[in-house]
Image (cartoon, rainbow, N blue to C red):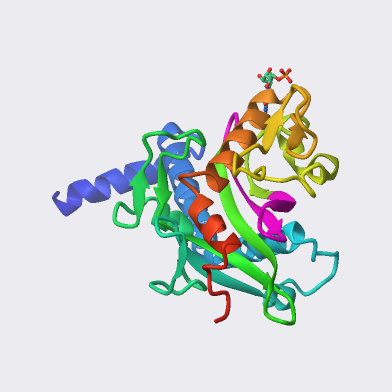
Amino acid sequence: MPSEKKDNIFSKFKKLPIDSIPKTILVAITLCLFCSMIVSLAAVKLKSIQQENQIRDKQKNVLQVAGLYSEGINIEETFASFEPRIVDIESGLFTDKFNPRTFNDRKAASDPLLSIALKDDPASIGRRSNYVTVYLLKNNDGTIDKLILPIHGYGLWSTLYGFVALEEDTNKIFGLQFYQHAETPGLGAEVDNPKWKAQWKGKKLRNKDGDLLIQVAKTPGPSEYHIDAIAGATLTSNGVNNLVRFWVGEAGFKKFLTNFKDGKINVSN
Ligand SMILES: Cc1cc2nc3c(=O)[nH]c(=O)nc-3n(C[C@H](O)[C@H](O)[C@H](O)COP(=O)(O)O)c2cc1C
């Protein structure tokens, strides 16, 4: 563009009244660019803090499900008493293929090389990783006090992520805890209600014949295996029922739990 013409446009623009449409648009665009820069900068700067908080929240939930959390404790220090190990779901044994302190379970679940597509998918998760991080809480003599298994599956609006803590021969539930979901407060989100969660303590997964009987249901069942569905949130309750049964079932940890019970798992490190 010839510089004379350019000068012309600029001087014409300069002479426009302050509330003219071109000047208003220019101010709006500048403001938008400035704000988006601030938001992007904040997102980049805060990412590591957010990731750190997510890790801390997950650790807090492992402590909660194992009954070791109380207000004000040092989460990182208490969490250090847990030993993370990676389970090879297909063999039902521990694997040292990956570092359990850095292994990303969620990434693995979407990696075609590390996961399988589920044909029968009651938990509505699409794919299941072949490698899953579990947490061992040991007694002083090296035996296992609690085994913490990660679980996830679809409720009504969202995928619920959580943990189930097992004790004794791993057939008895110590607790259940979700650390992420987007179910409705007062309805599906009652999965976080301590009163509802308390029902899980002491329930059994299977009977002596190995039949999987644990169930979340509206209709009453044998009290050893029965959890009352949340009133007004049957769909979320069904989701929790399906995901818990999936993860302790055939396509989940069943082989590992059987190996554990039969003493085929070497828990020493
Ligand atoms: C706005 C809205 C949010 C809801 N959120 C949930 C929910 O998070 N979980 C759930 O199971 N049901 C939720 N429901 C209710 C379900 O639509 C359904 O009615 C309920 O699961 C049936 O449970 P009930 O047989 O115990 O009444 C919601 C309903 C509405 C209108």
Q: Looking at the image, can residue 69 be seen?
A: yes
Nearest the eye: 92 or 247: 92
Nearest the eye: 9 or 252: 252
Residue 58 is covered by the magenta coloring:
no
Q: Residue at x 47, y 59 (%)?
A: 105
Image quarter of residue 167: bottom right
Q: Is residue 175 left or right of residue 37?
A: right
Q: Quadrant of the C terminus?
A: bottom right
User: Where in the figure is residue 186, as x and y percent of width and height?
Assistant: 78, 31
> Hey, which residue is sitting farthest left in the picture?
2
Q: Is residue 205 above or below residue 59?
A: above
Ligand 1 positioned in quadrant = top right
Image quarter of residue 49: bottom right
Q: Is residue 258 left or right of residue 214?
A: left
Nearest the eye: 222 or 188: 222
Q: Residue at x 14, y 49 (%)?
A: 1
User: Where in the figure is residue 253, as x and y percent of width and height?
Assistant: 52, 52
Q: Is residue 199 left or right of residue 165?
A: right
User: Where in the figure is residue 133, as x and y percent of width and height?
Assistant: 52, 63
Q: Is residue 241 above or below residue 99?
A: above
Q: Is residue 43 above or below residue 225?
A: below
Q: Looking at the image, can residue 50 be seen?
A: no
Secondary structure predominantly adopted by residues drawn in magenta = strand
Residues shaded magenta: 155-177
Q: Residue at x 57, y 74 (%)?
A: 267
Image quarter of residue 157: top right
> Hey, which residue is sitting farthest front in the picture?
209
